[in-house]
Image (tube, rainbow, N blue to C red):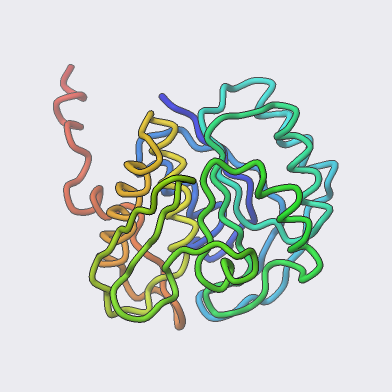
Amino acid sequence: MKKVLTIAGSDCSGGAGIQADLKTFSAHGVFGMSVIVSVVAENTSRVIAMQDITPDMIEKQIDAVFEDIEVDAVKIGMLSSPECMKAVAAKLREYRPKNIVVDPVMYAKNGCPLMELKAVDTLMECIIPLADVLTPNIPEAEKIAILKGGHAVGSALDVLFDGKRIYHFETARIDTQNTHGTGCAFSSAVASQLAKGAGTEKAVELAKAYVTSAIRCSTAIGKGWGPIHHFYELYKYGLRGAETDGAK
């Protein structure tokens, strides 16, 4: 089984952050591990408070994973402060994992900031150079001068540039407000596909298909931006082969 590590903040409401990443990993059949860099008290409507984990504890979590388990891909999500970023960057340079996907989370779905303004320069200097794939939405891309299509009007268009070619992935935009955690799920799906051996273009194509279906099958949980349905296939089809496996 392939192993994928998420380095990000938590979301106690379960729709985004570490919780969404681990659900997405499981949905893709990879083993998920996590390094928590911030604890976020949030729900579908608002962010109440945040508390960063100390850089030393972040480094020790990363050490604990890499000294014991082979890591096939890393997804980096919310890193709120320069200190968090520097700790993560130093350890990833030490361990040199392959398939690093960076989702430069700056805002929650409701618009609340999740990254200190002063941290953007550190993000660009320390974290972005480590990325094999970078997945900003439009507001985030405006800060770092790269583009993806998640907050545009019209169709849901994502643009991938691999250094040589530009690829477009377009689907009809789904009329729903249940999109909490879509960026987390998308980047985690890309990391999962890369870990399983897909090339970048194919990984993005499959990740977009997964997130589109998860949005389409979402349910209205909470009073604000509801979460997507990370396990829609499991709920629809059940545990395929479970009865056969149990009979062996």
- Front in this rendered view, residue 105 or 22: 105
Name the residue rendered at 80%, 47% in the picture: 86
Q: Is residue 243 above or below residue 20?
A: above
Question: Which corner quadrant holds the N terminus?
Answer: top left
- Front in this rendered view, residue 1 or 12: 1
Name the residue rendered at 69%, 59% in the picture: 39
- In the picture provided, is 109 more to the left or to the right than 197? right
Question: Which corner quadrant holds the C terminus?
Answer: top left
Q: Position of residue 169 (x, y in %)?
A: 30, 58
So how many labels did they put on this image?
0
- In the picture provided, is 192 more to the left or to the right than 89? left
User: Residue farthest to the front?
Assistant: 164
- In the picture provided, is 49 more to the left or to the right than 201? right
Q: Position of residue 46 (x, y in %)?
A: 59, 79
Q: Is residue 169 above or below residue 189?
A: below
Name the residue rendered at 42%, 39% in the picture: 192
Name the residue rendered at 74%, 41% in the picture: 89
- Front in this rendered view, residue 186 or 150: 150
Residue 239 appears in which quarter of the rendering?
top left
Q: Position of residue 164 (x, y in %)?
A: 44, 45
Q: Position of residue 151 (x, y in %)?
A: 44, 75
Residue 214 appears in which quarter of the rendering?
bottom left
